[in-house]
Image (cartoon, rainbow, N blue to C red):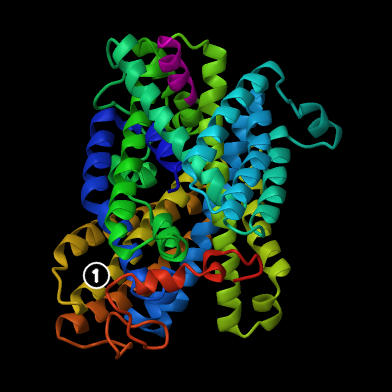
């Protein structure tokens, strides 16, 4: 799960009022995200656990694969750039979070080694890791790490130095086998998620009196319209295209049996929606105690987008304080929650981006790039880092609201395109397709609308890097939508599609049974990511 995004998006989206934000989180999670996440996982299992972009070739056509991979490349660029900025801002604002975040890495590696070598269950070691992390949070509060003097010595803003440090870290982390760092740290972070949700629930019950934020906010003139930007801003809080990449490329290789897809896919979406509701509560009931204070935090969209993450951190700290936890310690805890999730997202995003770079290079015939792990990793790191650091609208780079809107649009677009692949597969399988087609149409309309609106805004503001990028993404999306619509029409007519062996076929047209054989084969050590050089 891209667990940092359902924190950031809702914390910004309450700018339009908590009523419409809550409505979209609930409806989007139940009717769109669950279908999308579970569908991506099931389709991947039925196609030898390959990623959704590659599967598009079997289900739609070869052109669809290329188009999808390019759109995924842009999405991952924005994912990694956005979360690097989130982490950089939080480290600057909360230096007490530095020690627990960075010392969590060796703790996770030790746990990964222990689980892998002893073949033991992950629950107890990961719970011990969580206890160690909370001790490190206390240490971090006592010993904050401020890199401002180092940044000033080299003539750089502290946030930008943190961005560079995070990308240097992800370059290394993306080369490490999944079981060694990413997976054990995810175990620890999953426990953190439940603790954070428990603190939100208990803090609300103990000390909360009223929501000071309005259900429908009277936004200032010139603000982004609620349609379509509310849906784009909430992003992963309701449905996330990033999940289709993780479900189809990574999670499908880790299922014990394919019937677990319902619990992992749909259940995971419900869990993320619950976190989005918690973020909504933190930004409305916890971050401010009076309406005037809240209005100051959400005076305009730039203020709301720039301070959304900080408002969540303040809200969680206030809820924790209701339970007797010192405010400063609660603030560091909340910052660690967001940073840990964002860092895990970056780990996964850079790893996936490397795979996509290699696949695109292979399609283009660039053998040096497609076969060179180091070179592909450098591209996967350099492009989003440039996006995060390039000047354009703010002293430290693009203003966060601009990056977040473009990320949200591309993310929701990817979700819509993934749903189009799922819709064609479901139709060819003889199953009902309307539960997939309805959210698919809604998402494609909203994201296309947002891409056009953003393009006009970028041109008017003279953003001559973002405007062409937006136009390219829009053009690729329209092309892929047409390809998917034609494939869906053919599927409804009974056309078996480019993979003539049928919807259960693997990459070479070999049938895959509906039992757990596909998952068992995908769970071989080399498929799980145990080989660091595996693409």
The picture places residue 356, in percent across and down from the top left corner, at 55, 69
Q: To which residue does mark 1 refer?
A: 423
Q: Is residue 123 above or below residue 406?
A: above
Q: Which span is picked out in magenta?
A: 313-323
Q: Is residue 393 visible?
A: no
Nearer to us in this view, 232 or 460: 232
Q: Residues within 10 Å of mark 1 (few under 14, many from 20)?
A: many
Residue 370, image x, y percentages: 64, 77
Residue 265 lies, in percent from the top left, at: 32, 54
On-image quarter of the C terminus = bottom right
Q: Is residue 317 magenta?
A: yes
Q: Is residue 84 left or right of residue 293?
A: right
Quadrant in the picture for residue 226: top left
Q: How many marks?
A: 1
Q: Secondary structure at mark 1?
A: helix
The answer to if 228 sits in the magenta stretch is: no
42 up-or-down from 212: above or below? below
Q: Position of residue 483 (x, y in %)?
A: 32, 78
Q: Quadrant of residue 176?
A: bottom right
């Amino acid at each position: 799960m891209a667990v940092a995004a359902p924190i950031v998006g809702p914390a910004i989206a309450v700018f339009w009022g908590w009523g419409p934000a809550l409505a979209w989180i609930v409806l989007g999670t139940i009717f769109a995200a669950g279908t999308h996440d579970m569908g991506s996982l099931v389709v991947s299992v039925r196609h030898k656990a390959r990623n959704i972009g590659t599967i598009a070739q079997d289900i739609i056509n070869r052109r669809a694969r290329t188009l999808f991979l390019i759109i995924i490349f842009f999405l991952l660029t924005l994912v990694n750039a956005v979360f690097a900025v989130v982490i950089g801002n939080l480290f600057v604002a909360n230096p007490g979070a530095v020690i627990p975040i960075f010392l969590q890495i060796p703790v996770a590696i030790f746990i990964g080694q222990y689980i892998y070598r002893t073949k033991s269950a992950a629950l107890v070691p990961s719970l011990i890791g969580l206890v160690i992390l909370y001790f490190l949070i206390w240490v971090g509060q006592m010993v904050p790490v401020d890199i401002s003097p180092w940044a000033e010595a080299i003539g750089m803003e502290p946030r930008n130095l943190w961005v560079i440090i995070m990308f240097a870290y992800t370059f290394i982390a993306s080369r490490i086998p999944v079981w060694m760092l990413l997976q054990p740290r995810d175990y620890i972070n999953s426990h953190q998620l439940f603790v954070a949700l428990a603190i939100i629930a208990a803090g609300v019950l103990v000390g909360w009196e009223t929501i000071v934020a309005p259900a429908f906010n009277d936004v200032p003139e010139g603000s982004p319209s609620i349609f379509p930007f509310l849906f784009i801003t909430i992003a992963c809080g309701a449905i996330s295209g990033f999940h289709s990449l993780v479900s189809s490329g990574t999670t499908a290789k880790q299922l014990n049996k394919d019937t677990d897809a319902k619990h992992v896919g749909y259940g995971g979406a419900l869990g993320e929606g619950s976190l989005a509701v918690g973020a909504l509560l933190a930004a409305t009931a916890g971050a401010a105690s009076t309406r005037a204070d809240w209005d100051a935090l959400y005076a305009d969209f730039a203020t709301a987008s720039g301070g959304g993450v900080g408002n969540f951190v303040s809200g969680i700290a206030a809820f924790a304080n209701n339970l007797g936890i010192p405010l400063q310690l609660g603030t560091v805890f909340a910052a660690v929650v967001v940073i840990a999730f964002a860092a895990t997202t970056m780990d996964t995003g850079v790893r996936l981006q490397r795979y996509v770079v290699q696949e695109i290079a292979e399609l283009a015939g660039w053998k040096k790039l497609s076969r060179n792990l180091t070179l592909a990793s450098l591209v996967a790191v350099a492009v989003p880092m440039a996006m995060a650091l390039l000047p354009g609208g703010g002293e430290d780079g693009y203003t966060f609201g601009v990056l977040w809107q473009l990320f949200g649009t591309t993310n929701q677009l990817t979700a819509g395109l993934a749903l189009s692949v799922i819709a064609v597969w479901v139709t060819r399988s003889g199953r009902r397709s309307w539960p997939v087609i309805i959210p698919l149409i809604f998402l494609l309309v909203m994201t296309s609308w947002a891409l056009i609106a953003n393009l006009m805004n970028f041109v008017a503001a003279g953003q001559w890097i973002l405007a062409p990028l937006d136009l390219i993404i829009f053009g690729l999306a329209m092309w892929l939508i047409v390809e998917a619509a034609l494939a869906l029409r053919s599927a409804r007519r009974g056309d078996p599609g480019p993979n003539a062996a049928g919807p259960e076929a693997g990459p070479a047209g070999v049938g895959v049974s509906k039992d757990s054989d596909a998952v068992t084969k995908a769970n071989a050590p080399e498929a799980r990511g145990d080989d660091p050089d595996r693409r």
